[in-house]
Image (cartoon, rainbow, N blue to C red):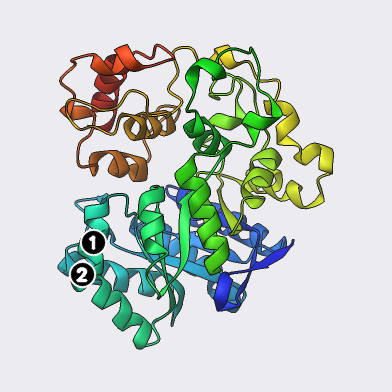
Amino acid sequence: MKYRKLGKTGIKVSEIGLGAEWLQGKTLDESKDIIDYCHKEGINFLDCWMSEPNVRTNIGISIKDTREDWIIQGHFGSTWQDEQYVRTREMDKVIPAFEDFMERLQLDYLDFGMIHFVDEIEDFEEIMNGEFIKYVRQQKENGVIKHIGLSTHSPTVALLATEVEDIELIMFSINPAFDMLASINNIEVYIEDDTYNDKELEGLAPERAELYQICKEKNIPLVVMKGYFGGRLLSAEDSPFGVALTPVHCIEYCLSRPAVASIMVGVKDVGEVEAAIAYESASLKEKDYASVLVNAPKNSYEGQCTYCGHCAPCTANIDIAKVNKFYDLAKHHDEVPESIRAHHNDLAYNASDCIACGSCEDRCPFHVGIVEIMEKAKKLFE
């Protein structure tokens, strides 16, 4: 296992970390098997945002004897209410949920206290000007947390976070689909050829490229989530590229982005851990995602959202690309992950606000049935 420094903190973490989301619903023995295997293979970085009590307890028991070997991210604002996950900024909910996190994970201190899931500018501003950030900073002053981080799927919010002096780490969703597909600007030129070219593979959405560069310049580490695009990139049928990548391809893409220190990989069993850590011994050929994507058929995008944003502006102010992204992440699971459901439902305007006017479909270069997707998303997330 290779290790990288987390920016100015000087902390070294494994470049492949354990994103514990899929430990929810696991027994103690199942959780312990996965965590013990990660530890044995040199993984020392763990993220736990889940509020469900049992998953927290199971993680706490599993790391009890090896606590000092782990760098742990825990989240402020992820709460358990009425037997379900709820993201909140209400301090009478935030404080007991964080105290529960520390108690169940059996922690005397937390390496990174993460401001949980901030995707809207208004939410960011309220946090940074209210009681929420005061409480987080108080925990740092008291030594309960060592460093402050923030998790977001929004490059705009992430860029704002780089301007806050005591935010020392940003957890951000990165994968080839999020980066490359959103960079499409000149659709007419883009659809002239049947496959990609090398120049297109180098293209990034401008705002995301700016984020990577600024984080590199300011030495603010990025920790990756959604690196497999919810598993879609691992299936030719589900991938927006029309070809399947391997876990090694996805990990290589993420770790080669500027400022990225580690990728949190969500796993359901030891086999999925093995597939991820195969990256550490993989050959250059096995890591070469570009040679796979360069032959991807562009016509695979017909009828599929590429998050390019050409459907905007929406009559009902919906961020259509973002709703489609969350829908795509969720629809391939047997049960909708509570985190993704919350991401959608907490948008200022989501699928339930669609008035089915169809103006977005007239502008879509890939002829996506957006109105139908909005209706499906509404049903899925409600």
- Residue at position x 40%, y 27% in the image: 331
- Residue at position x 68%, y 35% in the image: 246
Q: Within the image, what quadrant is residue 363 found in?
A: top left
Residue 80 appears in the figure: no
- Residue at position x 48%, y 42% in the image: 206
Q: Which residue is disc 2 drawn over?
A: 129
Q: Position of residue 106 (x, y in %)?
A: 43, 75
The answer to whether the residues at label 2 and label 1 have Cβ atoms under 8 Å apart is: yes
Q: Residue furthest bottom?
A: 142
Quadrant where the image shows the C terminus: top left
Quadrant where the image shows the N terminus: bottom right
Q: Which residue is disc 1 drawn over?
A: 125
Q: Position of residue 148 (x, y in %)?
A: 41, 72
**Height in image: 203 above or below 65?**
above
**Residue type, label 1:** Glu
Callout 2: few (<14), some (14-19), or many (20+) C-alpha neighbours within 10 Å? few
Q: Within the image, what quadrant is residue 55 found in?
A: bottom left
- Residue at position x 55%, y 18% in the image: 189
Q: Of residues 186 and 358, which is closer to you in this image? A: 186
Callout 1: few (<14), some (14-19), or many (20+) C-alpha neighbours within 10 Å? few
**Residue type, label 2:** Asn
Q: Of residues 188 and 178, which is closer to you in this image? A: 188
**Height in image: 151 above or below 344?**
below
Q: Between marks 2 and 1, how big is the CA–CA gap? A: 6 Å
Q: Position of residue 117 (x, y in %)?
A: 34, 54
Label count reads 2
Q: Is residue 184 left or right of residue 287?
A: left
Q: Of residues 162 and 25, which is closer to you in this image? A: 162
Q: Position of residue 345 (x, y in %)?
A: 24, 40
